[in-house]
Image (cartoon, rainbow, N blue to C red):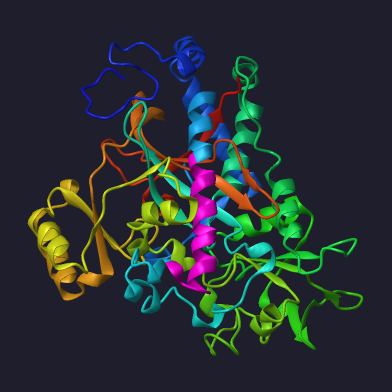
Amino acid sequence: MAEERSYFNEMLDNAGNPRAAYARLSAWLDAKPPNYLSRKTREAETIFRRLGITFAVYGADEATERLIPFDPIPRIISASEWRRLSAGIDQRVRALNAFLHDIYHRQEILRAGRIPESLIIQNDAFLPEMVGFTPAQKVYAHIIGTDLVRVSENEFYVLEDNTRTPSGVSYMMENRETMMRMFPDLFEMHRIAPVEHYPENLRQTLESVAPDLSKSEQTVCVLTPGIYNSAYFEHAFLADSMGVELVEGRDLFVDEGKVFMRTTREPQQVDVIYRRIDDAFLDPLTFNPDSMLGVPGLFDAYRAGNVTICNAPGTGIADDKAIYAYVPDIIEFYTGQKPILNNVPTWNCSREDDLAYVLDHLEEIVVKEVHGSGGYGMLIGPTASKRQIAEFRKILMSNPSNYIAQPTLALSACPTHVASGVAPRHVDLRPFVLIGDQVRITPGGLTRVALKKGSLVVNSSQGGGTKDTWVLED
């Protein structure tokens, strides 16, 4: 790992010495024979294949299933680093929930001129059907995945806030389980914050926002689009881990304003639905009439206060990339505090001056679709060919309001097992946050790693892999 670099190496300092958090891991790696990690990687693949830990592939390879590549070298975060990150995440998710309540009610942030009204009212992610309605406990986004990147020893940036149906928590948990099974000696050398309480915390969070908290027992279910969804493994994993039913739209029905689940005995009233389907498909009577995935009448039952939907419909406006540039203002407006975690500087291509700058610097920056995800619909200027840049320029000019742009960050790198041995590869981090009766942040989260040398694209759909993330305890 001694190659030239202009990025922050999380394991080694500038002199090539292990940083304090990585000291034991570095010595452990040095003591292992050359083929040890290759053998362990194959062992992990066997475990994942046996458990069925896959994701569905769309496009040319439609309906095929793949393993997400797993890297056996953990990413380590010190206790002090995590305290700062978790404080920043806590501040951010509270502000985003306050923002959601405001824009569906008094819209004071728009009246104050802190966000252009058109960015909200004309945004496809804004649901007029939610105006005037307050979910249980005033919580809109109950499950959030906040994507972070590191660029130096003390600098972390938030890339995006996933407030709709964030995925990846099952990989976080299975990565930890696999690591504990394969490397018990390495675990004995460290005091690592646990992640296995996530399903219990998720269920407690969901139950805490049920419409009627006086009931002795709340009925929770996970609503999935079905087995062909790319995250179906996770839907089944979470339902099983929480001890609740995994249902599809056809398993639920609405009667007299209440939602019921079909069972082998008699229908059972449902209090909380953890939905993993998009807004448009939730209820064909309110949204997309062609939807076969949702439940007719569900939204009316929700508006009547007879069932809680997590995350609430309309939460997507909080993670829309056009809104992202205003999140520092959102935090300051609702908390009266400066953001603990910074945004990446962002150009909004709907602004004439911003568009002119972006068009002049396409070779240097990253351009993203406002509603894009998974690494698609984007241009990474420094790694793009002249032809790709020319083609993207035409697309951008034809619909500039559909894009934002950001500088290319020098993402931090972690030691990663590759064909040639151990080498640095760029990473990001998705911590998982639960908001109900309290804010619960799982220590660590899912580290995604770009396995190709020099690549900054960490998404599994684009060839990225995952790592176990260790938060050290004091």
95 in magenta: yes
Which quadrant, please, contains the C terminus? top right
Instruction: Tell me the residue at 78%/60% (across/down).
Output: 244
Q: Magenta segment: does it hold 128? A: no
Residue 182 drawn at (x, y percent) = 62, 26
Q: Main secondary structure of the magenta part?
A: helix
Residue 345 vs 62, above or below: the answer is: above
- Seen from the viewer's position, the closer of residues 169 and 313 is 313
Identify the image quadrant of the N terminus: top left
For residue 425, what is the image quadrant? top left
Q: Is residue 268 above or below residue 326?
A: below
Residue 292 in percent (x, y) is at 59, 83
Residue 408 location, x and y as percent? 23, 45
- Judge by depth and name the residue closer to the eye, 171 or 355: 355
Does residue 261 appear in the picture of this structure? yes
User: In the rendered view, does 116 fall on the left or right side of 254?
Assistant: left
Q: Residue at the spot x=33%, y=76% of the render?
A: 118
Q: Residue at image x 39%, y 60%?
A: 373
The quarter holding residue 282 reads: bottom right
- 465 lies above or below 122: above
Specify start and end residues of the magenta stretch as a single range.
88-108
Q: Is residue 163 visible?
A: no
